Every structure is written in C-alpha cells, then in structure tokens.
Image (tube, grey):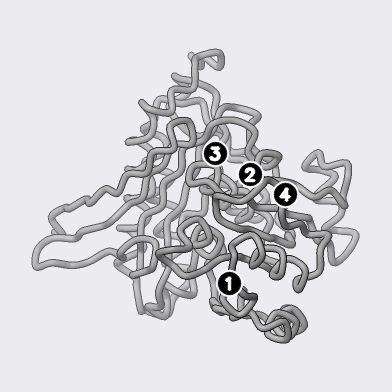
Amino acid sequence: MADKDQIFSDRMLSLGLARVSEAAAIASARLIGQGDEKAADQAAVDAMRTQLDMLDISGVVVIGEGERDEAPMLYIGEEVGTGNGPGVDIALDPLEGTTLTAKDMPNALAVIAMGPRGSMLHAPDVYMDKLAIGPGYPEGIVSLDMTPTERIETLAKAKGCESSDIMVCVLERPRHEDLVAEIRACGARIRLITDGDVAGVIHCAEAAKTGIDMYMGAGGAPEGVLAASALKCMGGQIQGRLLFRNDDERGRALKAGIEDLDRIYTRDDMVTADVIFAATGVTDGSLVKGAQRDGDYLETETILMRSKTGSVRRLIYRQNNH
C-alpha cells in the first residue's frame, strides 16, 4: 500500500540513493572504452531501475530517459520503488556522458536526484539556455536577459577581479560559435567540454577547486533540472529558459504542463523543495574519481548531497569484481 502522505525523509533515503547511482556506474564501467554508447547506457539504465525498485518509495520519474514511447525503461511518468513509502519525484540520468564512456574520456557520471512529490519541474526533452554561477553572490546578480559580456563583467566586478580572470564552461557545439567568440572578445577564458553539462554546471559550485566561475550555453532541459538539484545542495545559482526549434517541441512543453514558454526559471523554480542528489563517477573526472579496477576489486566514488543540511559526503564503495 503506497502511503503518499508519508514524510519525505531525505536522511533515511540518501544512502539508498547512493546505492542507485553506484549500481548504474558499476554496470556501465564494464563498457568503458568499448565504443558502444547504447550498450553502456542500457547497462546503466537496467542497473539503476533494479536498485530503484528496492527503495521504499512511491516514486515517479519526472526527468528520465525520454517520453514513454521512446524509452522502454525509466521513461517520464514511470512509477518506481516498492510503493511502500513517501511519494517522491525522481530526476535521473543513468549515464551522463554516454560518448565519454564509449571513448574513455573524463567526467562520465551516473546521476540521480530525489525530492518530495510535485517538487521538480517536468522539463520536456528540449534544449534549455542555461546560466550558472557558484555560491556567495547576491541573488540574481547575473541573468539570461544580459548579454554574455554583461554577465562576465558583472561577475568579475562582484568577485573583485578582471574579466580575464573569469573562466566560463561551455559545451563544445557548433551552435555555440557566436557565444564562444563573444566570451573571448571580452577577455574571459573558456573551458570547452565535449559532453556532460550536469558536471559542467556543478563545477561552478566549487570554483576554487575547478577554476570554473560560470557556465553558459544551451544543453538539455532535463539536465538543467538535475544540475539545479545539485546546486540546491551545494549553493550557487542557475537560470534556464526553454528553447524550441519547432512546433513539435512546443507541443511537448505544453503537454508537460508548461504555460509560459518564455519563462526564465531560477534554481528554486526548477526544484521547489529540499532535495537529495547522488553522482557516481564512471570515468575519472574533476568531480569524482571514475570506477577503478584494483586486482579482484572494483571501486567507485560517489558524491552524496542533501540540500536540507548542505551536507556533502564522499563515499567509496568497493566490491569483489567476480
């Protein structure tokens, strides 16, 4: 019997969530460097689904592998968990960086976030223009309504440095050629990433460690909600505005219950209540280490965060590889 009124106990559920991302990372790690994106993704999906069904939750996937007719498993709207427990929203990407995994490149992650039912934006599978910075700045100091140059100059002033000291993370795509040219023209530096914009946004929250001050550019809207979940735990700001290439994509947004197609969403618009977030490294990255084989053992590192307490845990999991 589902008890949707049960309290969402983030403390009790957080370790279970870490097990879910660990299982997905371990499954896909066996396919690192094999050049098969689909197989790596499928392995992560299967493992994540199996672990989710062991949790005492009445869960609904709000950010998942796609619409029901496109994804056989972990599709948007799918119910997961034992059904005995609190009603929760789940945002997930079983393998963020399928290409990174297939080519054994850095920053592939298994990612999942969970909050109370109704707390996460049901973002359609379209693009989202994103802007993110780390903690410690006044709310709304930079905005999607500003030009890239204005954002950089404003952040540099707030940080007490020159524009040339600001490092911006951008997804390397042809659509970002003008953005990259403008950022460089105003003197700022760019770290281009090939994939994995959830990790890219999270890097802003640890600028002292990663060297990244700001994230800009268009990527998947579902990943925007996952990134907002992480920043809600770590601190930092993110804004997102949905981008539509055609009427089919506008239709998807309307179907997802979105009325204002031009709205700028803040972090707390995308994730309205306390959230827990877990990410396990598949390949080595600047956030967490990738899955490592050590003789008969396989070892993973997970970052597990709770927004309620602002706690960040790093968990090492080791299992016999046979």
Disc number lying in front (2 or 1): 1
Quarter occupied by residue 43:
bottom left
In the rendered image, which residue does mark 2 sit on?
76
Q: Residue at x 54, y 31 (%)?
A: 274
Q: Secondary structure at mark 2?
A: loop
Q: Are marks 2 and 1 in contact (CB under 8 Å)?
A: no
Q: Are marks 4 and 2 in contact (CB under 8 Å)?
A: no
Q: Are marks 2 and 3 in contact (CB under 8 Å)?
A: no
- Could you say where residue 44 lies in the image, as x and y percent from the top left? 41, 57
Q: CA distance from mark 4 to mark 1?
A: 19 Å
Disc number lying in front (3 or 1): 1
Quarter occupied by residue 258:
top right
Earlier residue among tags 2 and 1: 2
Residue 203 visible in rendering: yes
Question: Which numbered dot is residue 90?
Answer: 3
Earlier residue among tags 2 and 3: 2
Q: Nearer the viewer, residue 220 or 239?
A: 239
In the rendered image, which residue does mark 1 sit on?
169
Disc number lying in front (2 or 3): 3
Q: Amino acid at mark 2?
A: Ile
Q: Single out the residue that lies furthest toward the front.
A: 160
**Label 2 Cα crowd, 10 Å radius (few <14 / some 14-19 / many 20+):** many
Q: Residue at x 38, y 49 (%)?
A: 21
Q: Are marks 4 and 1 in contact (CB under 8 Å)?
A: no
Q: Amino acid at mark 4?
A: Gly
Q: Is residue 240 above or below residue 116?
A: below
In the rendered image, which residue does mark 4 sit on?
140
- Could you say where residue 93 lies in the image, as x and y percent from the top left? 51, 54
Earlier residue among tags 3 and 4: 3
- Could you say where residue 271 lies in the image, as x and y percent from the top left? 63, 38
Q: CA distance from mark 4 to mark 2?
A: 31 Å
